[in-house]
Image: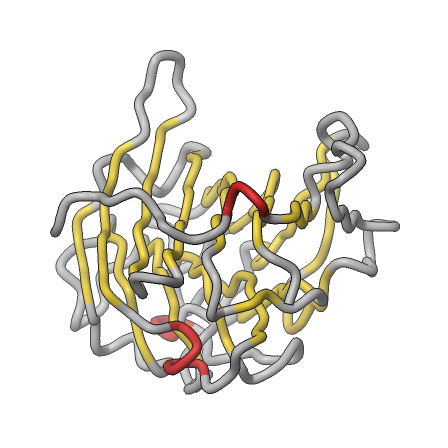
Amino acid sequence: MRSSRPARGGLLAAALLSILAAANAGGAHAADHMIKPIDAGYTEALALNGTAAVTSDRGRHRRIELTNGSFKQSGSAWSTSPVDLNGSFETSFRAHLHHGRPGADGIAFLAQGAGPRALGGWGGGLGYRGIRRSVAVEFDTYQNTPDPSSNHLAVVLGGNPDRHAAIAESSIPLFGKPFQARVRYDGGAHRLTVFVRALTAGSAEQLVLDQGVDLAARTGVTSGWVGFTASTGDVTARQDVYDWTVHAPLP
């Protein structure tokens, strides 16, 4: 794992694309570009596939429920506003992977060029197996044959979770308690960095992955979709994402 470097891209001049955060926080600044959900079943901001749905926590916090705890599920949720994959961007979100002991199989954040209906295989496929024009960041909670453990992160190219471009043990538990994640892409340096943080008081953000990759070249598009996939197999879990924001130049 290499040390983190500050992004050289134009994040200071970037617009804000905020998904699911508007229901949980205050309004954006006037210069921001904000997209927010319109109801619990379908949103202007999201394309939902497979088992993915937008739900709410007792009518308050909206979240993307990628899998609901049943067997052999696969779900995906994509921003309907494309992101410039030649430029720099940063995304942050909170995830809660829970229920089931052990839980399976985990979630992935993807940039992809297949389109807003992309959905991959269940089980160890983490919902993205077969999405070839993609770069995935795994948050994996089940040890399949190619995996080092049931608590790791990985960068995967070409929709094949059996081959990792980079892999590292998570510095915090990914299953059982909510956690914060941040993914930064430096378009000038073609560099992807991934950070995680526990949500307990006083917890510090930690760099887990730092990998060179050209997103536009790997996805085959200059303007692509970003979002999440998840799956279950013979072991299950409920896998939720909330407070998701993307800071990116408009394509």
The tally of labels here is: 0
Where residue 153 sits: x, y (%)?
27, 54
Q: Nearer the viewer, residue 177 or 37?
A: 37
Where residue 200 sits: x, y (%)?
39, 18
Position of residue 55 relative to residue 42, above or below, is: above
Residue drawn at (36%, 61%) of the image: 137
Here the colouring is secondary structure
Where residue 87 sits: x, y (%)?
48, 63
233 on left or right of 146: right
Residue drawn at (46%, 42%) of the image: 98
Q: Residue furthest right?
A: 38
Question: Residue 125's quadrant in the figure?
Answer: bottom left
Residue drawn at (46%, 66%) of the image: 110
Position of residue 172 relative to residue 19, above or below, is: above
Residue drawn at (59%, 65%) of the image: 83
Position of residue 146 relative to residue 68, above or below, is: below
189 on left or right of 106: left
Question: Residue 63's quadrant in the figure?
Answer: top right
Where residue 4 sits: x, y (%)?
22, 43
Can you say which quadrant of the picture contains the C terminus? bottom right
Please say whether residue 85 is visible from this viewpoint: yes
Please say whether residue 231 is visible from this viewpoint: no
Q: Nearer the viewer, residue 198 or 100?
A: 198
32 on left or right of 166: right
Q: Residue furthest top?
A: 202
Q: Nearer the viewer, residue 86 or 233?
A: 86
